[in-house]
């Protein structure tokens, strides 16, 4: 019987027995919260049984996934964790874990084939999960929105402040939020205090789920909208009229016409525009 790594004593014992410690350079903090694992499993319920896990580490979340019948493909960069990770799984279920030794920003994410001896599958759908390093969360989100093979959903445990910029609420648009909103719909699942990790980070975390839009714009179009919006968010405290004038060379008459087409005021700030506003504004500015 494998003891759960959410037990701090078990975790510390495993780390000590293998002479391991969290690498600050890799943003490693070990999860010790059953509630987070339960929330991930609840969010995945009804979805595909094939999971790509980003940075599984010692396997705290992996244990929950494997025990719940999921087939996991874990991408792990740390040499030591790659060796230890399979042994953290119940022996009879280890065939449902494939460990990829590599960088999650470079390895392929789609999970198409079950491990040798594992269950067969009838489709190519998969989900992405991960307790992702704070220092590369933006790059991971960027990679997600650029995937050619789109997952059914992505569930990330990340720094709370980053999560809040991604999960769009009215009058709170940001450039990362726009990027994500163009790709899909995001939802905050759970607030996670720093006490849920060993070692405890200096910031709190949040668990979010992102589901892709069925009518998603092409990658080229989304990139064009983000490029158009970037100057506005670089001056996010300024009214859109300011950026239309200084970055796009529009005069007062043109600015008024643009605002009327968008049904907004020239004094509106970037955070107050919706995804639809940005799409329409890009169409106007790139004619």
Image (cartoon, grey):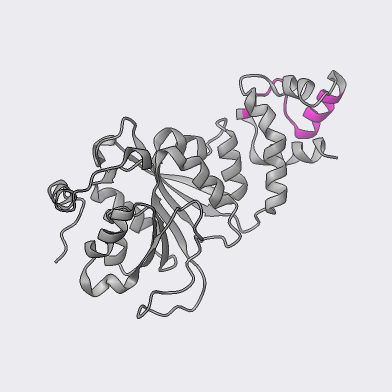
Above/below status of 279 relative to 54: above
- In the image, is 120 to the left or to the right of 219? left
Query: Quick one: 43 or 260, which is closer to the camera?
Result: 43
Quadrant where the image shows the C terminus: top right
Front residue (pair 247, 213): 247
Residue closer to the observer: 105 or 170: 105
**What residue is rendered at 40% in x and 69% in y?**
49
* Residue lying at 14% horizontally and 53% vertically, measured from the top left: 17
Q: Quadrant location of the N terminus? A: bottom left
Residue at 46%, 42% in the rendered image: 137
* 280 in magenta: no
Find residue 248 and report its horizontal and vertical position in percent. Answer: 80, 27
Residue at 37% across, 42% down: 26
Left or right relative to 164: residue 182: right
Question: Residue 127 appears at what percent x and percent y?
Answer: 46, 61
Q: Where's residue 92, x and y in %? A: 23, 75
Q: Nearer the viewer, residue 162 or 216?
A: 162
Q: Relative to 136, is 92 above or below?
A: below
Q: Give the range drawn in magenta.
A: 254-270
Could you tell me residue 258's position as x and y percent?
Answer: 81, 30
Left of 76 or right of it: where is 244?
Answer: right
The part of the image, by quadrant, that contains residue 270 is: top right
Query: Looking at the picture, does residue 212 appear above or below residue 230?
Result: below
Q: Can residue 164 be seen in this view?
A: yes
């Amino acid at each position: 019987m494998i003891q759960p790594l959410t037990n701090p004593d078990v975790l510390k014992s495993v780390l000590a027995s293998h002479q391991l410690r969290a690498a600050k350079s890799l943003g490693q903090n070990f999860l010790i919260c059953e509630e987070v694992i339960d929330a991930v499993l609840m969010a995945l319920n009804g979805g595909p049984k094939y999971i790509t896990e980003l940075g599984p580490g010692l396997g705290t979340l992996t244990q929950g996934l494997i025990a719940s019948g999921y087939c996991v493909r874990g991408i792990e960069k740390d040499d030591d964790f790659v060796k230890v990770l399979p042994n953290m799984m119940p022996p009879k279920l280890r065939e449902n874990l494939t460990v990829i030794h590599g960088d999650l920003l470079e390895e392929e994410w789609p999970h198409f084939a079950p491990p040798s001896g594992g269950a067969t599958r009838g489709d190519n759908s998969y989900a992405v999960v991960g307790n992702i390093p704070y220092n590369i969360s933006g790059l991971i989100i960027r990679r997600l929105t650029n995937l050619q093979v789109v997952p059914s959903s992505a569930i990330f445990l990340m720094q709370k402040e980053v999560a809040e910029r991604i999960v769009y609420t009215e009058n709170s648009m940001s450039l990362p939020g726009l990027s994500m909103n163009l790709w899909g719909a995001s939802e905050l699942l759970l607030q996670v205090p720093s006490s849920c990790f060993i070692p405890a980070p200096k910031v709190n975390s949040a668990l979010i789920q992102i589901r892709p839009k069925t009518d998603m714009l092409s990658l080229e179009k989304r990139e064009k909208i983000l490029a158009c919006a970037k100057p506005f968010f670089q001056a996010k405290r300024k009214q859109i009229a300011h950026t239309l004038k200084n970055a796009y060379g529009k005069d007062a008459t043109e600015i008024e016409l643009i605002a009327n087409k968008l049904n907004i005021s020239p004094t509106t700030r970037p955070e107050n525009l919706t995804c639809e506003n940005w799409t329409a504004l890009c169409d106007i500015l790139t004619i």
